[in-house]
Each structure stands twice: as C-alpha cells, then as structure tokens.
Image: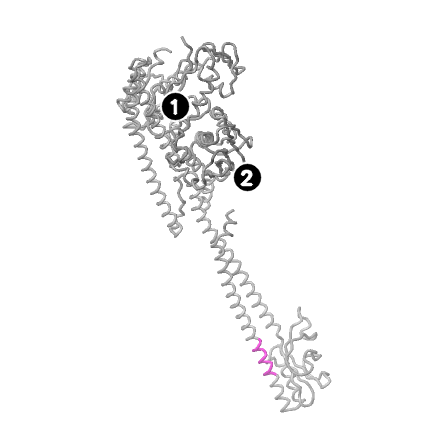
Amino acid sequence: MLLAKTLRSSTFRLALISIAIFGAAVVALFCYVYWSTTTYVRSRSDRAIVTELAVLQDAYAGAGRDGLITTIARRIAGKAFDGGVYLLVDPSYARIAGNLEVWPSILKGGSGWGNFKAREWKPDAAQRPLLRATFESLSDGSHLLAGKDIQDLEEFADKINTAVVLAILLIFVLAGAASVSVTRRTVGRIEAVNATSRAIMQSGLSERIPLRGTRDEWDELATNLNSMLDRIEGLMAEVKQFTDNVAHDLRTPITRIRGRLEKAYNNLPDGDPHQLLISDTMADLDGVLRIFSSLTRISQIERSDRTAAFRTIDLAEMVREVVELFDAAAEDKGVHLEAVGDRRVLATGDRDLLFDALANLLDNAIKHGRAAGRVTVEVRQSDGSAAISVADDGPGIPADEFPHVFKRFYRLERSRQTPGNGLGLTLVAAVARLHGAQIEMLDNAPGLTFRLVFPAPNQSGVEHRNELRKRGSLG
Amino acid sequence: MTDGRRRILVIEDDSETAAQLADSLAASGYQVDLAVDGNDGLSLGHSAEYAVMTIDRMLPDIDGLAVIRRFREDGIVTPALIVSALGEIDDRVRGLRAGGDDYLVKPFAVAELLARIEALARRSDTVVKETVLRVGDLTLDLVSRTATRSGREIELLPREFQVLEYLVRNEGQVVPRAMLLQHVWDLHFDPTTNIIDVYVGRVRRKVDAHQAYPLIHTVRGVGYCVRAPC
C-alpha cells in the first residue's frame, strides 16, 4: 500500500521529471565525450597513415619503383610505424611488394579510405584484426596502399562505448532507486501525519505524530502539529472541566430542590390541593432536567474522544429491538411499522448511544409521519459498511430545511405544537459523528428518509492506530 | 433482611442532599452512616460492614471513583452506587470500570435511589429459582413464558413478558425506568424519548384492562410498581 502511495505521490512525479532532465543531459555529455575521444584518436591514426603514404610517395618520386620497394621493405622491417601495412600492386592489381597479399576490394577505384580484414595479417590472432588504409595511384599506373592495424583503436573505442553505456545505465538505476527511497521517506512521513489525523478524527485527540529525532523540517512540522494538538486538547479539557463544573453546580442545588419538594409532598395529607401544585412543579423541574440532560449528553458525545464503550454489535438485532419497542407507539397512531433488510449486520459502536439515536429517528418518523401511514426501518450490509435507514411517508421536510434540522433546538414551524425539544436530531448527528457514520437525508416522495451509513470496520480508529504504530516502528 | 444487612454508608459532601438521603433511608428502615468526604468515607468503609454504599462522584478531597477503586483493592466488595452530578456518558463506562455496581445521575427522585439501593442489597441475597410467580390473580409461568389472569391467558410478546416478569419479581418495590431499561433492554441510560412509558402502557393495558383491580402502577417521575390490593 505504501509502495502504491509512493508511486502515486507528487514527490515521485517530480523526481521522475528531474531524472528525465538530468538523464538527458548526462546522455548528451557522455555521447559528446565518446564522439570527441574516438574522433580524435581516429584522426590521429589517419594523419599518421597519410604521413606514411607521403614518405613512400617521396621515395617513389626520388628513387623510382625500386627505391619505393626498398623503402617499403625497410619500413616493414624497421617498425618505425608500428602495425603498418603496405602493398604495392601493378595496374592489374598484381602484388609487387608489401606485407599484404591481396589488394582489398573496398579500395579499388577512385581514392579514399577503407577498413578491411586480411587473411594473412597476424593469422594466429584470435580475432582477425581490423586494418585501415588509404592508397594513391602512382604515375606508372601502379597502386600504392598504406595503412595501419587499428584493432587496438577499435577496442579502445569499444571500451569507451561500453563504459559510457554502463555509466548511463548505472546513473539511471541509482537515480531511480534514490528517488523511490526519498519519495518513500517523504510519503512515509506524510502518511504518519495522515494516519494520526485519521486516528484523531476516529478516536480522539490523544494521538500524536511520531518524531524521528532527526530535527529536520518533518520533525519540525510534526512538533508544530503536535503542539497544536496539545493546545486543542488543553482547550477541550478546559471546556470539559467547565461543563463538568456547570453540571455539578447546577445539579446539586436542583437535587436539593427536588428533595425538598418530595419531602413537602409526602408531608401533606393525600388529596391536599398543594400536593397537585407540588407534583406539577416536580414534573416541570423534571422536564427542565430532561432538556439539561439531553444538552449535556450531546456535548459529552460531541467532545468525547473515547470509544471505550465500543464493541461489536449486531445492528439488525438492535433494529428489531427498537422496532419492537416502538410497536406500541406506532399502534397508538395506526402507523404500520416494519423492519426489513439483512438478518445480521455487524458494526462497531456504543450500543446505548446507537439505540438512543435510532429511537429518536423512529420517534420522529412516527410523530411527524402520516397518521395511519407507514414507517420502514431498513438495515443493510454492503462491502463491509452497514447502513440503517428510517423512512416515513409523511409530509417530509422542504429540502432547504435539510441543513438546519441537526441544530440544537431547531424545530420546523409546523411541528411547534407537537411535543419535543428540538434536540433529538442533534443527538442523532452527534452519535453518528462519534461513530464516523455519514448521515443522509433523502426525499422519500412522499415523506423523508434518514440514512446512517457506518464505515467498514477496517476504517475504524483502532485500525488507524495500529497502522500508525506500524508506521512509527518502521521509521 | 436482618439488621446487619440494612446498614448503609453514604459518602456525600453536600450536607443538605446528605441529610435528605439519610432521612429517606432511615424512613425505609436503613441505618445510615454519613461521610462528608473521601477520606472520611474510606475510614468508615474500612471499619464496618455495610450492605450498600452510595458514593458521590465529585468529593472535595478524593475522586469518588478513586474511593471505590481503593475499596476494591482492599478487598471490600460492598455493592457501590455511584451518585454523579456529571453526565452519564463518561461515568457509565468509567464508574462501572472502577468497580461501581450501579450509578445514578443527580438530581434523582429519592424513590429511585431507594429502589436501586434495594436492588443492590438484594443482589447479595440468595436468589430462589422459582418457576411460577404470583401477584394477586396474576400468574406468570416462567417455563412456558405465559401469563394468566384469573385463569385467562394474556397474550404478550416475549419482551413484554420480560417487562412484566421483572416488575413482578420486584413486587411491591418501585422499579425505576432506568432499571427496567437495564434489565430488559440492556440499556444503561434513559433514552431521550419517552418510549418506555408507551411500551409499559401497552403491557399495562394487556394486563389490567377489564380486570377487577389494577396491578401495574405508575410512580410519577420514577417508574413502575406491581402491587396487588391488600
């Protein structure tokens, strides 16, 4: 997976582009070096051959054919011109003198240069050497050839050629390997940041990006991000402390008030008119407390970074239980309530919270759906992810209201008269977020569908933490 | 229940709440020892044997959970009811993990506290395995899972039978809504909807409609009670 990420990464693409540019430059440079070296060596050798031929022509001009033959013999014996080949032939190309037997066919007619091999030249060599020669026609119609064994030269050029090709290959292989490893490192570091971010989104602010102690820019980035996280965690803790204190400081006096009311109620004789007053007060107080509890519950879920109560639950079984629980309420309103879908759908989560969220969705569907209508709860598992949807066939909600329904205390104008406090869907949204679930609202035409889509188990926070740990130990 | 089993330790720093608790518990026949902070509670808890203890989550000196943890480390297994003024989401897990047996969120009806203390105190008693439960003219056959009233069978869904069974098992006691949720649905806090009331309402209709006298009574703001007329 890391390799695939490496190959996809922009760092790797940049590295490939640099390799291409520098590679082209290196290839051009090496080609030039090869070309100029071999050209230089060859032209030196050619100049020597031309000089040799000029020496022989001088001998011919000065001493005639016999002088030339003598000079050729001397040159062959003298080794002044190492590896030199000579041949003097008559106009019909019959050999007169020299150390070659046959006039090379490549040099017949006109003038110029030719590379050839001769059977008689170093016959015991493993490979027949390459000879290079030029010729001149003499005034008596005979032809004079002078040349040189250039086998060493060719071998030298071959060696340079091989060296250049190998060097280019080596440079490309090294550059490729280096860019993969550099990219891998970069991707690995970015992936550590990514994995931490995912783990934080999944399971809370306790995760930190691992440092490598290299004090490079990555460590600096990680340090900065970590101190940002520390700061956020600190603020969250302060907020938590604050809400805890508010909760504590409000609940304690309310507990006293409730206690006093209960005591007063019990001290009155049964049937006393004040008893009704007191019990109404207690009922109102309980109503206030329910809203208060819902609010604290929502904010606790929202800032919850713990998934301690998470375990594997069968959503299908939970749906059946909730549907059975709401059967009585549906019956009261003449609503046909049914659960459909898969028999077994596993997900990871907090059963209490999911039960409560689903109960809120069903409560809404029955309360705001059509009287004598139909409410369907569907639970499905596909590709490892699970989805629960609650659909009614009531009046639905205008699409422009969709984004608002999850806000605290938000209520549609027409439902102001029905009991409720506008916190139910806020709670559903908070529970969904805690579980990393997507919440969707769809027009059921007529009616409304709420859909909760849970991530596949392998995307859970636990997996991310493991992934992170693995990464950390790699680096 | 003998006297030894009716001694209760209340660790509560708010003096008025503590006094209210002590009064109500004393009125129900419990002998109450009060501790105003964690250290006080620890020394009392170590010196005497209690049937149940209630521990406030936020104490001036030691965290209530730390007190329970200390008791458990010292081998004191007295059932502990955590009384929390914080929300239930965090405490539900942390409180029970620290060794608490039940928890109650402030503010609470005294009747609910009493019901929970009763339940915790009973927990240590031996449970008799009955196969038939009777209240008034209602008979529950726990083997065939059928309920009959005056000889006529009442048609109940399995979960409805469980609700009725739990209420009947606690005959004469107030069963708080939260305890019903916990035992029948395995839910550990009150849902934000009033669905349980609707559900129990239907059970009551099935059990009490067209009968000589009602058996299931609602205790306002707390829960339910099954009681036959004397």
Whether labels 2 and 1 share one chain:
no
Q: Residues within 10 Å of mark 1 (few under 14, many from 20)?
A: many
Give the labeled residue for mark 2: A383
Q: Eyeballing the image, is B74 above or below A180?
A: above
Image coordinates of residue B42 in percent, x first then y, are: 31, 23
Instruction: Tell me which amino acid carries mark 2.
Output: Asp
* A409 lies left or right of A399: left
> What is the chain identity of the residue bearing mark 2?
A
Instruction: Depth check: give the residue in front, A51 or A362.
Output: A362
Q: Main secondary structure of the magenta part?
A: helix
Q: What residue lies at 67% left-to-right and 71% top-to-bottom?
A: A128
Image coordinates of residue A465 in percent, x first then y, are: 45, 40
**Residue A50 on the magenta span:** yes
SS label for mark 1: strand
Direction top: furthest residue = B230
Instruction: Tell me which amino acid carries mark 1.
Output: Asp
SS label for mark 2: loop
